[in-house]
């Protein structure tokens, strides 16, 4: 069985196997969990939500998705934490707080509620707080100790910046084996901390307003009776929670706070484990995936006939740095590196239907991109050739266009770079085919619409985008090639160059680039029908060819 991780970061195969085992072996437990770290049942988590001076309506669903998709947790959400009692608290191994009372700092929920919560923690219930979620009940001393960190009289922050986590405690289970990482986040300075808080990670950044150096403890743990508590100043918004390092940190903290062994492995680029510099390649193949590994770590993976209903590459990596992102919350139809038409004969082949756009419902568009046949060739040098026969048709209709598609994936060079050659040959089967797009227009200060064809959605860990092209301008709309590069989770410079074959390119092509660091939304495409729709008559063929190169460093 293939598992697609929709959070745009690469999980070790051991984690995926463990996740499946835990889900299948779950048991119902009526009282809250014992702290048996070898228990095999999923961890039961209650997310507190419903009130926060941050965007809880966005972050709570994302937290729920992060926990659920790991396969390690059974998650429930309450937007009425004041309705909880000891009888309900004790059903859960972990309370994951995404609620606060700010700015009503004097708020209290009564002695019975407070006693029940304190009893739950002291008897072994875990608590996990992040950013402002412990900034509540300022007159209740026990909560201050449990929550570890809150906004205090001297606390301040400025605009979000790229911060670097460092000096992660290699003796604590949460941070053991983790290298530092970079994150775009709102950084608190002079956080008010409770007595007994232990820092297990630190942060450096430069203040966005006046440029002063920031150096703060950022990750904390404590113990209250038998209960384990976690707090980090990180996690201001959805963008911060999409960071692979942040997600890894929260999942590991959730396991530890619940009294379990920490089994979530970090992305390879964050791991302190040293890798052999000499390549050792191998293939892994299933009925829906074809993967090249180097020392058991994914170099690239091709996905087809899976739940997303179209072929795509994800993950694409270079030297263990993740490049692509798959099915992010803002655009669930963005699939790493993929080729897709927007409209064929006025039916949408790009976005999913509202009722079919989740793992629970499955994924369907108005038009189907159906793989009729596939052939995969493993070459002795660890390059590969993939061939697909595809039909395009309405969900309940006959094919209107066919395609013969081929990929040639090169073996990685000594510097880790490699390329993918794509060849698309389309043939019209109906009387005519209209290939169309949303007409491009300026909306919200940038061009929107016009996209179709080959596309890349980049990792949401990336910062500091760089553009280069074959022309004089970095934003050359008709250039032969474009390069889009970034700084990665660990500060490496990586990027992708797309080159159009001059003999097989579209006259209606225009480069389409989205550079939005707030979501983050980094997208890249030689949009094949940007300038105008294309009408093809029955029997007509159309060929497009590209070379896509993954590399570390910047293109020359």
Image (spheres, rainbow, N blue to C red):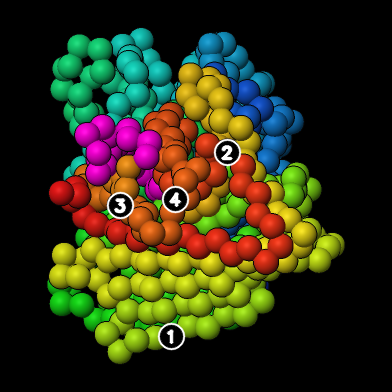
Query: Earlier along the polypeptide chain: callout 4 or callout 3?
Result: 4
Residue behind mark 4: 456
Inter-mark Cα distance, 2 to 4:
21 Å
The boundaries of the magenta stretch are: 458-478
Residue behind mark 1: 377
Residue behind mark 3: 497
Inter-mark Cα distance, 3 to 1:
25 Å
**Within 10 angstroms of label 2, few (less than 14), some, or many (20 or more) residues?**
some
* Image x and y of residue 102, in percent: 53, 15
Front in this rendered view, residue 355 or 228: 355
Number of the front mark, 3 or 2: 2
Give the residue at the far bottom of this rendering: 380
Front in this rendered view, residue 360 or 180: 360
Left or right for 304, reference 144: right
Secondary structure category for the residue under label 4? strand
Residue behind mark 2: 532
Inter-mark Cα distance, 3 to 2:
25 Å
**Within 10 angstroms of label 3, few (less than 14), some, or many (20 or more) residues?**
many
Note whether 156 is above or below 239 in the view shown.
above
Query: Earlier along the polypeptide chain: callout 3 or callout 2?
Result: 3
Q: Which mark is residue 133?
A: none
- Whether residues under marks 2 and 4 lie with C-beta atoms below 8 angstroms apart, the answer is no
């Amino acid at each position: 069985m293939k598992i697609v991780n929709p959070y745009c970061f690469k999980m070790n195969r051991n984690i995926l196997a463990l996740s499946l085992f835990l889900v299948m072996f779950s048991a119902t437990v009526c009282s809250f969990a014992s702290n048996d770290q070898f228990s095999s049942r999923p961890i039961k988590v209650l997310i507190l939500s419903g009130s926060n001076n941050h965007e809880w309506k966005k972050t709570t669903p994302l937290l729920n998705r992060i926990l659920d998709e790991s396969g390690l947790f059974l998650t429930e959400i309450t937007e009425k934490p004041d309705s909880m009692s000891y009888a309900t608290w004790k059903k859960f191994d972990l309370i994951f707080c995404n609620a606060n009372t700010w700015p009503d700092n004097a708020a209290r929920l009564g002695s019975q509620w407070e006693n029940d919560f304190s009893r739950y923690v002291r008897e072994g219930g875990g608590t996990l707080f992040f950013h402002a979620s412990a900034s509540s009940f300022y007159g209740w001393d026990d909560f201050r100790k449990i929550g570890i960190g809150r906004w205090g009289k001297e606390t301040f922050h400025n605009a979000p910046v790229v911060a670097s986590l460092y000096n992660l405690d290699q003796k604590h289970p949460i941070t053991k084996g983790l290298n530092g990482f970079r994150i775009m986040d709102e950084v608190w300075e002079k956080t008010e901390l409770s007595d007994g808080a232990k820092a297990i990670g630190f942060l450096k950044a430069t203040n966005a307003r006046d440029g002063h150096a920031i150096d703060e403890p950022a990750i904390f743990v404590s113990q209250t009776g038998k209960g384990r508590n976690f707090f980090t100043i990180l996690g201001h918004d959805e963008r911060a929670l999409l960071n692979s390092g942040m997600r890894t940190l929260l999942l590991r903290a959730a396991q530890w706070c619940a009294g379990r062994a920490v089994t979530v492995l970090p992305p390879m680029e964050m791991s302190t484990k040293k890798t052999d510099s000499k390549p050792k390649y191998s293939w892994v193949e299933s009925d829906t995936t074809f993967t090249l590994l180097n020392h058991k770590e994914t170099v690239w993976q091709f996905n087809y006939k899976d739940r997303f209903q179209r072929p795509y590459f994800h993950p694409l990596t270079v030297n263990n740095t993740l490049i692509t992102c798959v099915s992010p919350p803002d655009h669930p139809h963005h699939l790493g590196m993929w080729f897709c038409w927007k409209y064929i004969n006025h039916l949408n082949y790009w976005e999913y239907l509202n009722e079919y756009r989740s793992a629970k419902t499955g994924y369907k568009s108005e038009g189907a991109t159906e793989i009729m046949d596939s052939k995969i060739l493993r070459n002795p040098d660890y390059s590969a050739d993939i061939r697909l026969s595809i039909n395009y048709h309405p969900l309940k209709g006959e094919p209107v266009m066919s395609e013969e598609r081929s990929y040639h994936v090169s073996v990685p060079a000594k510097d880790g770079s490699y390329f993918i050659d794509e060849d698309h040959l389309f043939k019209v089967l109906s009387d005519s085919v209209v290939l169309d797009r949303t007409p491009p227009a300026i909306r919200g200060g940038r061009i929107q619409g016009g996209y179709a064809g080959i596309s890349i959605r980049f990792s949401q860990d990336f910062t500091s985008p760089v553009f280069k092209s074959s022309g004089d301008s970095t934003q050359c709309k008709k250039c032969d090639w474009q390069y889009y590069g970034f700084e990665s989770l660990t500060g490496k410079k990586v990027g992708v160059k797309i080159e159009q074959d001059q003999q097989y390119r579209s006259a209606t092509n225009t480069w389409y680039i989205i550079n939005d660091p707030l979501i983050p939304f980094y997208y890249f495409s030689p949009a094949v029908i940007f300038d105008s729709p294309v009408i093809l008559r029955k029997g007509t063929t159309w060929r497009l060819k590209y070379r896509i190169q993954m590399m570390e460093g910047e293109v020359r």
